[in-house]
Image (cartoon, grey):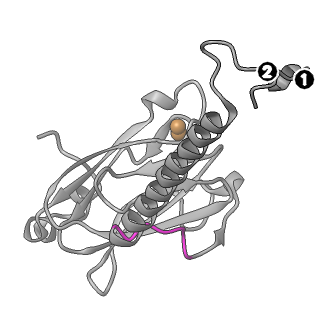
Amino acid sequence: MAEPSSNPLQRPLADGVVPEPVVERTENRWVAVMAAMLGVMMAVIVVTGVSGALHPASNVEVTDPQTLHLAGEFVESNLGTAIEPDGSATVRLIAEQYDFVPDCVVVPAQTPVTFRLTSADVVHGFLLPNTNVNTMVVPGFVAEVRTTFAQPGEYEMPCHEFCGLGHHAMWTRVSVTPREKFADQGPLERTRCEKH
Ligand code: CUA
């Protein structure tokens, strides 16, 4: 030990140079910290996914983006909110650069609501803050998300998938009205948002 070695790697370390075992210990600590952070993040994803009922779309439906406006479910007259025979609501929307059509929808509170969306051009995103509604809208496919709004309120709805130069201006609104009030409305008011 006391014998100075001729091997330069075994010479006493100069001041300020950290010995190898200390470096290793420090690195191991940081690996443990990183692993713990990853574990916490995975747990957050799983817990919020389960508690908030966030999950990938359970159905795969295809549609032709070229002929959306000509025939079928997504013709213009069929867009907006429709009430099904069982009392639930179905909302159909088209996402396109740089609008949602229609640009505002009215839905009843405390009622099962099914959103059905598709894209006429590129990938868009549909997100209602503080709900389980969050999906990509991919051309050629129908995105379906089900939810129930407990309270009346207004949801500003941003496109949350970058879709081009106008992405930041691609917004629309979901207006949740009280259940009784919605039932009293005619078909026209149901598909239009009045200014409050
Ligand atoms: Cu549409 Cu971003």
Q: CA distance from mark 1 to mark 2?
A: 7 Å
Give the x, y percent position of residue 127: 40, 51
Q: State which quarter of the image contains the C terminus.
A: top left
The quarter holding residue 195 reads top left
x 62%, y 54%: residue: 138
x 43%, y 56%: residue: 40
Local secondary structure at mark 1: loop
Q: Are marks 1 and 2 in contact (CB under 8 Å)?
A: yes
Identify the amino acid type marked 2: Arg
Taking depth in this image into account, of 58 and 78 the one nearest to the observer is 58
The quarter holding residue 90 reads bottom left
Residue 156 left/right relative to 29: left
Give the x, y percent position of residue 164: 60, 29
Q: Which residue is mark 1?
A: 7
User: Would residue 96 be visible to someone looking at this image?
Assistant: no
SS majority, magenta: loop
User: Would residue 176 be visible to someone looking at this image?
Assistant: yes
Give the x, y percent position of residue 119: 59, 51
Query: The magenta stretch spans which residues?
Result: 52-58
Query: Hey, which residue is sitting farthest top in the picture?
Result: 15
Query: Hey, which residue is sitting farthest right in the picture?
Result: 6
Q: Which residue is mark 2?
A: 11
